[in-house]
Amino acid sequence: MRIASFSLLFVFALNFTVCAEDKIQVLKNAGIESPSTMMDTWINKKTDQAFADWKKRYDTLKTPEEIAQYQKQVREQFVSHIGGFPERTPLNAKVVDIVPRDGYRVEKILFESQPQHYVTGLAFVPNSPKFQAPYPAILVVCGHSDNGKAYAGYQAGAALAALHGMIALVIDPICQGERYEHLNDDGSISVKSTTTGHTLFGLGAILLGQNTARNEIWDGMRAIDYLQERDDVNPNLIGCMGNSGGGTQTAYLMALEDRIKAASPSCYVTTLEHVLKEIGPQDAEQIIFGQLDWGMEHSDFLIMRAPTPILMCTATQDFFSIEGAWKSYRNAKRIYGRLGFPERVSLTEADLKHGWNKPLRESAVQWMSRW
């Protein structure tokens, strides 16, 4: 402790006496790590121990009873650490316009996930004699696109689902599409970056003991409420899929929402170890306070809902580590196997960069058609 205290005092003293380049050399000459290296060393030691603790805990999950208890405990911690959820209030849902398409129609949807907190969405509804209502339905959650639900890839995935007999509802996340949160007095957008918007939103949430993820998850849960209220939806056949930030939302929703009967997170699930070492901090909704300390890894998003059918969509050249994705998949596969349903978790890999590319969209829709 004395050595550590002396080292820190030495570092602080340097701030007043030498330039940045000289500080590093003086520290090296004294055999002391630089402040950034000292912090990295301390954090890496803590996280390495946390990863080891998670692995040790994971290895104890042998029986269905032990797995069920683990699922319950992690889910409760997850909800607690994002600040819980608000009460359900009337959705006041309405269809504000309908756009006809070949084989389906697009309904422009508006509902309130909380009082006067409006969610904008597009419902892609089958319009073919090959399929009859009530239809299965899929919630499509968006990644970090400025235009949200209007992003071509998300609309392509939703249209593909509709052409295969499923209603697909694409909703705008906060700070995207028609839901920008930071505005000037004249109503113009003051913060156009979706990631910056989420992070600014997250700063206020932290002060309330919450997380940006809470709002995105709740919007998704209320979107499922809306789907189940529709006469043309089979309320017992609801799926969820999304890419990148939408992969994050899919992972969260499938972990916490029992009404989701099949899911496909794309270009997100890897391991926290790979995230920390290769990417670093992410958006506010992707950083759950104390997540590693209280024991939730990326694998847990899949494990929490085992044996619900889940397809991981991955990209070989993604900045979300493909090695980490396969590691989480193997962790989940073992749990699914111990529950007697190894076929209900799968992984598809496209040798492409980050994005909900055509092979991944098609794989996701095939998975939804199957389950």
Image (cartoon, rainbow, N blue to C red):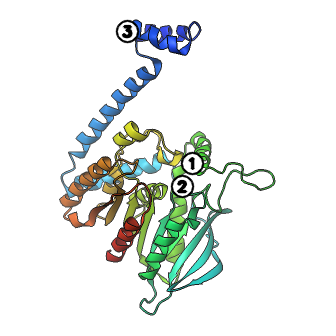
Q: Is residue 167 left or right of residue 107?
A: left
Q: Which SS class for mark 2? A: loop
Q: Nearer the viewer, residue 64 or 14?
A: 14
Residue position for label 1:
195
Residue 366 position within the rendered picture, expressed as x and y whole percent measured from the top left: 35, 73
Q: Nearer the viewer, residue 290 or 350?
A: 350
* CB under 8 Å between discs 2 and 3: no
Sort mark 3 into few (<14), some (14-19) or many (20+) by Cα contacts within 10 Å.
few
Sequence-first tag of 2 and 1: 2
Identify the residue shown where x is 69% and y is 50%: 182
Sequence-first tag of 2 and 3: 3
Where is 41 relative to 99, above or below? above
- The amino acid type of the residue labelled 1 equals Thr
- The amino acid type of the residue labelled 2 equals His
Residue 246 position within the rendered picture, expressed as x and y whole percent measured from the top left: 48, 59
* CB under 8 Å between discs 1 and 3: no
Residue position for label 2:
144
- Disc 2 to disc 1, how far (Cα)? 7 Å
Residue 229 position within the rendered picture, expressed as x and y whole percent measured from the top left: 53, 77
